[in-house]
Amino acid sequence: MTQATDMRPSVPMDADIIIVGCGPAGMTAAIELAEANRSVIVLDMQPTPGGQIFRNLEDNISQQSSDRQALLAALGPAYRAGADLIRRFRASSRIDYRPLTTVWEVRPDGTVGWLRGMDAGYLRATTVILAHGAMERPVPFPGWTLPGVMTAGSVQTLLKAGNLKPTGNVVLAGTGPLLLLLATQLHKLGVKPTLIARTDRFSDGLRAMRYLRRNGLLPVVKGLGWLAQLKRSGVRMTSGVSDLAAEGERKVEAVSFTVKGRRVRQPCDLLVVHDGIVPAIDIPNGAGLALQWDQTNASWRPRTTSDGLASSALPPDLQPERCVVRITGDARRIGGAEATIAHGRLTAQAILAELRKGDGISSKSQQAVDRTLSVRPFLDAAFPPGLSAKLPDDNTIVCRCEELTAGALREKIRAGFGNMDALRGETRCGMGPCQGRNCMITAARLIEEDRGACGSTPPVFRGRPPIRPLPLGALAGLTGLDPSATELLTLEDKPEHDVEATSDVPAE
Amino acid sequence: MFSPIAPLTHSITVYLDDQPISASKGESVAACLLRAGVPFNRLTPVSGAPRLPYCMIGQCFDCLVEIDGIGNQQACLTIVRDRMRVRRQNGAAIALEHSAQ
Ligand code: FES
């Protein structure tokens, strides 16, 4: 595959810019670039624009029924606020929007592998913007694989796009603004959570106070409003909980945790967990882009310049001439809808400046980025990772796909499989369908635990395409192959006396 | 575990293990299965443990089902189609037996 870089000029470009992800950051960048007469392709997994935050907004707004109106009211004004952005996105004729499309490979040179149904291929652009967003921090705890344990984001997705609300005994556990927002939304829909078990403490909130900035006051006031509302409606809330466990045979039946030195058990039908939001690094890691450890968010994030330019961490022989990938929105750094819109615009302006169009990054966009991010230090301090604070005990499943426990991994690490790829090869941790999206951070921390290392950047599994399943039928019909780098081999091409060259196979 | 917020409109029919269930146009297969109240959408290949959707945004792969004959499809990323045939996955696929038929 190394020859692709020098052949590059001969391959036709499909667009000026390919954008991965159609949330607020991707949409904003697309609109900005299209307005400057650039051709833009937007690839997104969802059926409609909006990302997770404005998921299914168009449909919810268009329905006149009183139930939908009640849903919109419960989801609140921040959800409805995306309507204008989506409308402007839809209205732009220069944007080639391709929904229900999965990206399974990105290369630093601007090549993107896509899949839609059973069609797949490669697309190329002068610049690629990754705006694929965030995911909830993966948290292994006893029983987290039981049916009836779901993340806060998933329950919110069901409200927005599934026309479903929880019934029965609902317990929310963990920390973060999303957990409290969801509790408020559920309550407005007539679902009163039985209990909210928070890992954060009053002292976290106090300590966070010194990070309060005038520009970041509004979100804090909003959050206090949610808390007051929940309190008024008599929702039970406890804080400082630890050692969460879900109990049950074939589904969750109860949740238990420790608070103030006491073990508490609460029967439930649905356990909703949340431990904050982290950038989704599957695409950057698969692309061989440099990652860094973000201590305050306790997560990896791609290493980028302030205007989103990523850098390749590939070995020298795979290194492209130039890395043309930019990363924006929550995929770059967690900030929430407004911050991602601000950074999406800034990224687009940086690209236009590079193309000698436009006036470069305006001070207004820079200020918008700074303003919208100013609340983050407060939130990071007020809601530190809780459910994931301690590493799981030996009996807890770490890898959901291959059902590997922390104990099994610890044993292999002690036996010498002390780097990520060796551990993966030995145990299959990270090799299941999710490709390490849920276990990578825990596996890395278990290795660090063994080394006694901490404070460094935890190691990652080396990502390899395809980073999402690609049906063989789709692979066989791959379009957009680079003709100059594609050789069609037949059986006749096989040398008479084939000497297997095994000596120069590089070690892992 | 879940109940509809609004009555089903634009209802279509999806077959779950050959049994007809109603689905709402535009929703994901995962939402449809949760509304139907199935206790699991797959049994894991390793221990046979039941699983239901966990993340609903395509990250956890616990929602895998067979759709129109193709296995390991993410139910949370697939939109229902009229007369779609969904099968729950029961443990590891019996690869050879299947292809011999
Ligand atoms: S529910 Fe997690 S991938 Fe579908």
Image (tube, grey):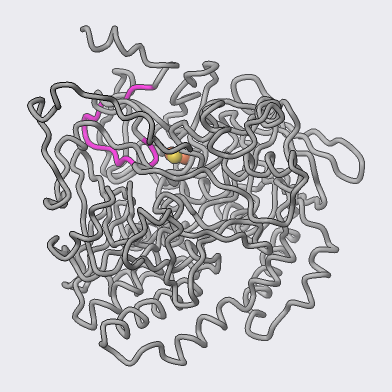
Number of marks in the image?
A: 0
Q: Is residue A418 visible?
A: yes
Residue A126 x %, y %: 24, 69
Q: In this view, does A107 lie to the left or right of A264?
A: left
Residue toward you, A93 or A370 = A370
Mainly helix, strand or loop, the magenta region? loop
| Residue B55 lies within the magenta run | no
User: Where, by quadrant of the figure, is residue A352 drawn?
Assistant: bottom left
Task: Indicate whether A81 appears above or below A465.
Answer: below
Residue toward you, A121 or B18 = A121
Residue A80 x %, y %: 43, 68
Q: What stretch is highlighted in magenta?
A: B74-88
Q: Name the residue rendered at 19%, 80% in the picture.
A: A37
Task: Indicate whether B54 appears above or below A297.
Answer: above
Q: In this view, does A83 lie to the left or right of A37?
A: right
Residue toward you, B19 or B53 = B53
Q: Name the residue rendered at 85%, 63% in the picture.
A: A203
User: Where, by quadrant of the figure, is residue A488 drawn?
Assistant: top left
User: Where, by quadrant of the figure, is residue A233 drawn?
Assistant: bottom right
Extreme left residue here? A492
Q: Name the residue rendered at 11%, 51% in the picture.
A: A483
Q: Can residue A100 be seen in this view?
A: no
| Residue B76 lies within the magenta run | yes
Q: Name the residue rendered at 83%, 36% in the picture.
A: A264
Ligand 1: give its quadrant: top left
